[in-house]
Amino acid sequence: MQTAAGVVLAGGRSTRMGESKAWLEWHGSTLLHRAAALLARTVDGPVVVVAAPGQELPRLPAGVAVAEDPVEGLGPMQGLAVGLAAVAGRAATAFVCSTDMPFLHPAFVRRVLRALPAGADVALPVARGFRQPLAAAYRTSLAGLVGDLLAQGDLRPGMLFEHCEVARLGEDELLADADLARHDPALESVVNVNSPGDYAEARARPAPEVMAFGRRVRAATLGAAAAGLSLGRRAEVAINGDQLAWDDELPLVTGDTVASPSGDAGRVRSS
């Protein structure tokens, strides 16, 4: 079983932000919807959002499931245990990320996942000066070990790495991937927003540049990319040749090519 899943940890307390990161607006979508939908368009297996007990979530992409954490306040290790257990029967590996990574690129996800088949249990990026356990790939079979460590009071992801085989990916190794080097040379995929200032700075950046329906535009979502076009009612869209269900909040990233499944460019509405 080589299927890869996606896990988004959404149950953090967002203490420094002062409000739930999952609900933060992102170019007409939310941070959580963007993270979940980006994984859904990248991996070939299930995508699960791990939520705190009773946590209210914004709208999620179709097909994305929610796994409720039975215990609140134990941090990312608890979320990791719940998320890996939720997908363990359906995927061999999982890319795990936090909610607050608005610049995560599919090329980064694919590069990290490709580091696991060599026999490692974890593919751990070391980028922008830090280990990135919440932008990493894990064997789903680690769910039991993570649970055992939690039972022993080990709440830090670093403790897990002492008990399994970890493939560390430095920046040079990550950027040896031509697709990642072309679309995310600064490895902004691992940038997260922890405070109102971080969020304001990130939100003020221009939207990604994409080729959409025959024109070059800046758009962070499919709905924004289709603005001003008379496309009619669409059920599907082709992104980089992959056919996906139409969702106005579907995230777009630098380098995307967006077209109708038939390849027509649509008509620009007259003013």
Image (tube, helix red, strand yellow):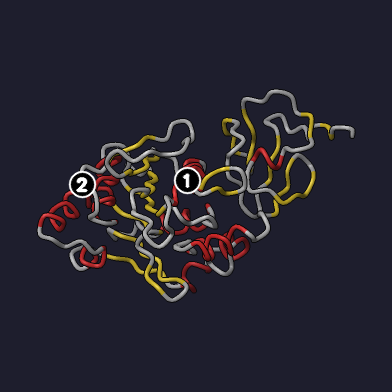
Q: Residues within 10 Å of mark 1 (few under 14, many from 20)?
A: some
Q: Secondary structure at mark 2?
A: loop
How far, Cα to Cα, is label 2 from label 1?
21 Å
Residue located 20% across and 66% down the image: 159
Q: Is residue 264 above or below residue 16?
A: above
Please provide percent x and percent y for residue 171: 48, 72
What label sits on residue 71 in the rendered view? 2
State left or right for residue 233 relative to residue 10. Answer: right
Please provide percent x and percent y for residue 105: 54, 55
What label sits on residue 213 in the rendered view? none
Task: Tell me the quarter of the image containing the C terminus.
Answer: top right
Residue 98: which quarter of the image? bottom left
Q: Earlier in the sequence, mark 2 or mark 1?
A: 1
Q: Nearer the viewer, residue 210 or 170?
A: 210
Please provide percent x and percent y for residue 220: 63, 48
Q: According to the image, label 1 marks what residue?
A: 23
**In contact (CB < 8 Å): disc 2 and disc 1:** no
Q: Is residue 125 above or below residue 234?
A: below
Q: Nearer the viewer, residue 53 or 37?
A: 53
Query: From this viewpoint, which residue is outermost toward the front?
Result: 18
Residue 223: which quarter of the image? top right
Q: Amino acid at mark 1?
A: Trp
Residue located 57% across and 30% down the image: 245
